[in-house]
């Protein structure tokens, strides 16, 4: 839907820069190779990664080498950081051979500027030399709560009461596999924490899968790295938002990776999908990051403090110099001689690096020889397709389901909201904006919209304010044009652009 009046007063929460973000576009792929300077420093990596960012990426990359890059595969010239994740492969059941699944449109790393719920915590930029990993390469099961990953997550407000806010629990909920069907309303981010079976993908995901990964955004404030590349950081208690643990009090930008894979193009072939680390379940999906922002003209802290637009567009930040997709695509790796000739695209007879497939539930490497072969499998669930929550500003899908607007029908009408719908918490300076129901009265009848918002600091008065917002239903032709413009971008946007 399209909002025809300015949204200045639509929701007071949206005027808070603490909820801003920017969406880095890395449309160019530096390369695919067995390189991992965090886990396999100085040597050939154990499995294939797809790599984005600064052109000097290699087995021993660090901040200094990355900022010396001559180019970047990302859209902002100053961002020479390294972003990398393992790609999925398709194994053909007839030939037994593997081929890498095609990437669609590169990667979108999001930088969320989410402060603490109290709103009084500043956000510190990643310092030079900062590095981290999200996810576990060897995980092959799901252990949150009663392990019922066949059902949607319980409401986030219940996680603490259910004792589901340990770092192990939060890390497992920081992984998502978004089933893409552009004829339907998009699924919500981090809805499904496992990789669906090929049969499910064939039947439900014609436009492929979007792999999603949220990184920890709480820091101990001193360590640029740690032995496991994870202990120096932690998740807030709601994964994307929430409170940081006392052990990691410094709030960082929330880094979120999106990568789309063309799994929908294999419907006419029998086989399985498996990630390059030998994981057919998705529980072992992971990603790596090395801060590589060139701070010659401005610091990353300047960007965190300045680039607080709610639309998420990098063009909205006056500090950023943005290059075209063609320029991003021209930036590629000079691969080390030891792996320059390795065929990582396939078809090949084994996963590059001779990585075995482990189905679990034991961690990879701990499974028996029977459960660690491609002939064994476990029954994967089929969590049904579910439309995600959408932003109240423009109808686009929001990570973490922070806002929701899901009308049963649409018409030209007025929405009337009232400050009286807020419910005070024990702290009088806070308000929980719970689920509120508003009714459209339009020519085609009543329309119900549910708006879900998170806890926010406000100043209480006795005055009841009223905001009127007009909604205009687009024509069928306009909807068709909207849905078909830049399909990758259409399903890559969590935030404030459609």
Image (tube, rainbow, N blue to C red):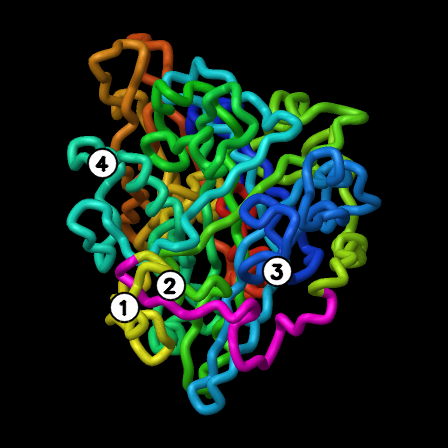
Observer-nearest of 223 and 9: 223
Mark 2 nearby-residue class (10 Å; few <14, some 14–19, many ≥20): many
- Please name the residue shown 50% across and 66% down the image: 88
**Quick one: label 4 or label 1, which is nearer the N terminus?**
4
Counting from the top left corner in percent of width and height, residue 213 is at: 46, 48
Between tags 3 and 1, which lies in front? 3
Is residue 345 located in the magenta-colored stretch of the structure?
yes
Seen in the picture, residue 88 relative to 265 is either above or below; the reply is above
Q: Which image quadrant is residue 118 in?
A: top left
Q: Main secondary structure of the magenta part?
A: loop
Counting from the top left corner in percent of width and height, residue 488 is at: 58, 60
Q: Tell me how far mark 3 sits from mark 4, CA to CA.
A: 38 Å
Between tags 4 and 1, which lies in front? 1
Q: Which residue is mark 3?
A: 34
Q: Which image quadrant is residue 435 in?
A: top left
* Left or right of 480, for residue 181: left
Residue 378 appears anywhere in the view: yes
Regarding mark 2 in the picture, which secondary structure is present there? loop
Q: Which residue is mark 4?
A: 159
Counting from the top left corner in percent of width and height, residue 62 is at: 68, 38
Segment colored magenta: 340-362
Q: Which residue is mark 1?
A: 380
CB atoms of marks 3 and 2 within 8 Å:
no
Q: Tell me how far mark 2 sits from mark 4, CA to CA.
A: 23 Å
Q: Which mark is residue 318?
A: none
Q: Tell me how far mark 4 sits from mark 1, CA to CA.
A: 24 Å
Observer-nearest of 465 and 25: 25
Q: Which residue is mark 2?
A: 195
Number of marks in the rendered image: 4
- Please name the residue shown 43% across and 53% down the image: 137
């Amino acid at each position: 839907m399209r909002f025809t009046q300015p949204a200045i007063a639509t929701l007071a929460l949206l005027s808070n820069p603490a909820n801003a973000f920017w969406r880095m576009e890395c449309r160019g792929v530096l390369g695919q190779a067995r390189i991992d300077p965090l886990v396999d420093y100085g040597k050939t990596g154990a499995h294939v990664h797809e790599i984005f960012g600064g052109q000097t990426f290699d087995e021993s990359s660090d901040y200094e080498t990355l900022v010396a890059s001559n180019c970047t595969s990302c859209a902002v010239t100053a961002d020479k950081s390294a972003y990398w994740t393992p790609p999925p492969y398709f194994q053909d059941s007839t030939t037994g051979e593997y081929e890498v699944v095609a990437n669609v449109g590169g990667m979108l790393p999001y930088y969320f500027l989410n402060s603490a719920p109290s709103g009084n915590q500043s956000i510190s930029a990643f310092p030079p030399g900062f590095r981290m990993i999200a996810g576990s390469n060897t995980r092959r099961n799901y252990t949150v709560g009663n392990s019922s990953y066949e059902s949607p997550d319980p409401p986030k407000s219940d996680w603490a009461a259910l004792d589901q806010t340990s770092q192990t629990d939060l890390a497992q909920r920081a992984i998502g596999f978004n089933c893409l069907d552009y004829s339907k309303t998009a699924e919500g981010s981090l809805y499904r924490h496992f990789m669906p079976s090929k049969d499910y993908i064939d039947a439900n995901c014609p436009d492929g899968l979007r792999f999603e990964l949220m990184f920890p955004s709480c820091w101990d404030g001193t360590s640029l790295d740690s032995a496991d590349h994870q202990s120096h950081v932690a998740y807030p208690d709601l994964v994307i938002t929430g409170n940081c643990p006392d052990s990691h009090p410094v709030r960082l930008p929330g880094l979120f990776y999106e990568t789309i894979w063309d799994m929908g193009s294999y419907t006419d072939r029998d086989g399985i999908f498996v990630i390059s680390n030998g994981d057919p379940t998705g529980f072992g999906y992971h990603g790596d990051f090395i801060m590589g922002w060139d701070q010659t003209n401005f610091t990353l802290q300047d960007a965190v403090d300045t680039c607080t637009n709610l639309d998420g567009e990098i063009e909205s930040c006056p500090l950023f110099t943005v290059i075209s997709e063609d320029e991003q695509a021209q930036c590629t790796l000079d691969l080390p001689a030891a792996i320059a000739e390795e065929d990582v695209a396939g078809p090949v007879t084994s996963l590059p690096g001779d990585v075995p497939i482990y189905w679990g539930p034991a961690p990879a490497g701990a499974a028996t020889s029977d459960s660690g072969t491609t002939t064994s499998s476990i029954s994967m669930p089929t969590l049904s397709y579910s439309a995600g929550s959408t932003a109240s500003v423009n109808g686009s899908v929001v990570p973490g389901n922070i806002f929701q607007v899901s009308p049963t029908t649409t018409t030209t009408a007025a929405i009337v909201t009232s400050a009286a719908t807020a419910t005070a918490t024990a702290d009088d300076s806070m308000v929980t904006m719970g689920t509120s129901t508003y009714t459209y009265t339009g020519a085609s009848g009543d329309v119900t919209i549910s708006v879900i918002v998170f806890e926010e600091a406000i100043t209480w008065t006795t005055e009841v304010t009223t905001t009127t917002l007009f909604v205009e239903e687009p024509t069928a032709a306009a909807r068709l044009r909207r849905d078909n413009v830049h399909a990758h971008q259409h399903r890559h946007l969590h935030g404030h652009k459609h």
